[in-house]
Amino acid sequence: MNQIQALKDILSDDTLENVLILPHNMPDGDTLGSCIGLYFLVKHFNKRGYIVLNDGIPSNLSFLFDDEVRCLTSKEVEHLDFDVSIAVDSGETKLFEDRLSLFKRGKTRVNIDHHKTNSFFADINIIEVEASSTGEIVAQLFEAYDCPLCKRSAEGLYAAIVTDTGSFKYSNTRPLTFEISKKLMEMGFDFNRLNVEIFQNKSYEKLLLLNRVFETLKLYVDGKCAVIKLSKELIEQLALTEYDTDGIVEFVRDIKGVEVVIFIRHLNGEAHKVSMRSKYDFDVSEVATAFKGGGHMKAAGFKIDEKIEEIEAKIVEAIESKFGL
Amino acid sequence: MNQIQALKDILSDDTLENVLILPHNMPDGDTLGSCIGLYFLVKHFNKRGYIVLNDGIPSNLSFLFDDEVRCLTSKEVEHLDFDVSIAVDSGETKLFEDRLSLFKRGKTRVNIDHHKTNSFFADINIIEVEASSTGEIVAQLFEAYDCPLCKRSAEGLYAAIVTDTGSFKYSNTRPLTFEISKKLMEMGFDFNRLNVEIFQNKSYEKLLLLNRVFETLKLYVDGKCAVIKLSKELIEQLALTEYDTDGIVEFVRDIKGVEVVIFIRHLNGEAHKVSMRSKYDFDVSEVATAFKGGGHMKAAGFKIDEKIEEIEAKIVEAIESKFGL
């Protein structure tokens, strides 16, 4: 049965009431913005949506929420029964592991996502791999269900699209992305505010961090491979949280000539997280797989328990060999 | 008479042959991309377009040109007669002063632009202040004239739009910008390459410069005003050209809490160039006017012959007073 029709049938059932909406852990603009869209979509069907998240919201996305549309914690909804639960932008259930039992309490479980690795873990799976973002899929649901957009839903969905496409710069952008963005913008949300909040809101501390990380930059393979490192000492010195390093690996990727960038970040003990990004056709997921990690062609990573210098040497060797050296 | 029809009539005149197409000095993506669009537009009318520029092309835009579509120098076209000359993205003729006599040699002179300060200096003036970019205007001419786009013209016009809107982040973006961008993207130019070339191509030297300029950053007015400086010494030490500093003032504007940023750059002797950018409603053009400069509400500047520290003190005073301090 058509999955989009199946969800419509469920939402149209007048006996149903509460809908659980789950963003993934370490939420980004796509998962949060899509949840906001879904909140208004289910409201249109006279359902009450509950967006539930135990992680914090990145500061540049907090403007999306207010007293009307809030994120609740698991604890705040534990007394409720859910007729429908919707996982949003999650390829697999481990991306909301802390709320998995909550998700399972939904009588019908729904999975809306655009990751090609999605494991179809729900009763209704609306997966569109070609979509730039889950927000783009949700925007299409509004159209398919003849559900009018409002300023808030349009703002959420636009935020979802614009963050996942790097403001229409990444190759997941397609003509339909522009068509949908036009319709969303026409709803008249504060376009300037959204872009300032999301993109023009780097903390001074983050720029300072960028400066210090830049000092660790080493170029390999004739400048095609860049390595940056964030040591335990620097993390402590700058009192960094996980989110503070967002965007740094992309910043280095954008150096002219660099085709692949490796970011090695201290986690705890000897554990380090390695993030890789590429620009053109270099498949970083292959390198990540060799180190028991995973990801996409242009964005992948893994965790490893070794000294930072040893990790650097090993990865550079793997990269060089992929470059045929 | 309708200016768009007037240009069509001229272009449809079979007795005409050569069209001069003039980008403005220190060319940006909008002027160059729009010129490429116009090159193909006039070709559709069986005219030969000559894009003439004596300045260099910024390295991140050079991919737009090749053997088919080239920029010629004034010298290379001095033997030619021009039936039509078109100034592109220039609010006034001093923006192509070095080629003004060439422009005047055109029997019919055309001015296509989106700056609200445009002085309507030509015979035919196609000025659309609401357009995000001149590229957006030229794209509309293709439609008005029933002229089919090709990959190259679409690529040029998309480059024009995407650079002038900061990849759809600036408030000059409108719903029509997305509609046009969709049509351009559908022509199938290499979307990933365009975005990599334009946006993911920062030179290592530029990042180094950013690092050094960041060290000069001072915050005023509770962090609402940021000042960065580029001294003669640093310019010489890093062997910088004018283009190398592109984007630096925007980078600092994007610090959280900063509403206005001032960039003071040494020119020669005691001459300095001051560039100002704002984020929300702070009108920097008012400050620039007080120093005999000009510009837009969110981007303005002026030149001044004083010592760098004295300039800083004076501007900070002007900014503070505008903040009511």
Image: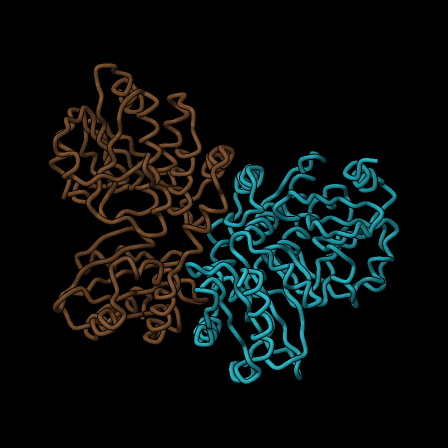
Chain colours: A cyan, B brown
The x and y percentages for residue A192 are: 46, 51
The x and y percentages for residue B114 are: 31, 39
Q: Nearer the viewer, residue A34 or A323?
A: A323
**Horizontal side of residue B156 vs A96, given as left or right:** left
Q: Nearer the viewer, residue B62 or B318?
A: B62
Q: Nearer the viewer, residue A306 or A222?
A: A222
**Horizontal side of residue B218 vs A296, given as left or right:** left
The x and y percentages for residue B5 are: 31, 20
In the figure, residue B156 lies in which quadrant? Answer: top left
**Horizontal side of residue B71 vs A56, given as left or right:** left
The answer to whether one can see residue B126 in this image is: yes
Q: Please identify the residue farthest to the top as the structure is shown.
A: B14
Name the residue at 52% across, 82% down: A234
Q: Quadrant of the N terminus of chain A?
A: top right
Q: How many marks?
A: 0
Name the residue at 49% across, 61% down: A253
The x and y percentages for residue A69 are: 66, 56
- Residue B217, compared with residue A160, is above or below; it is below
- Residue A286, compared with residue B235, is above or below; it is above
The answer to whether one can see residue B219 in this image is: no
In the figure, residue A316 lies in which quadrant? Answer: bottom right
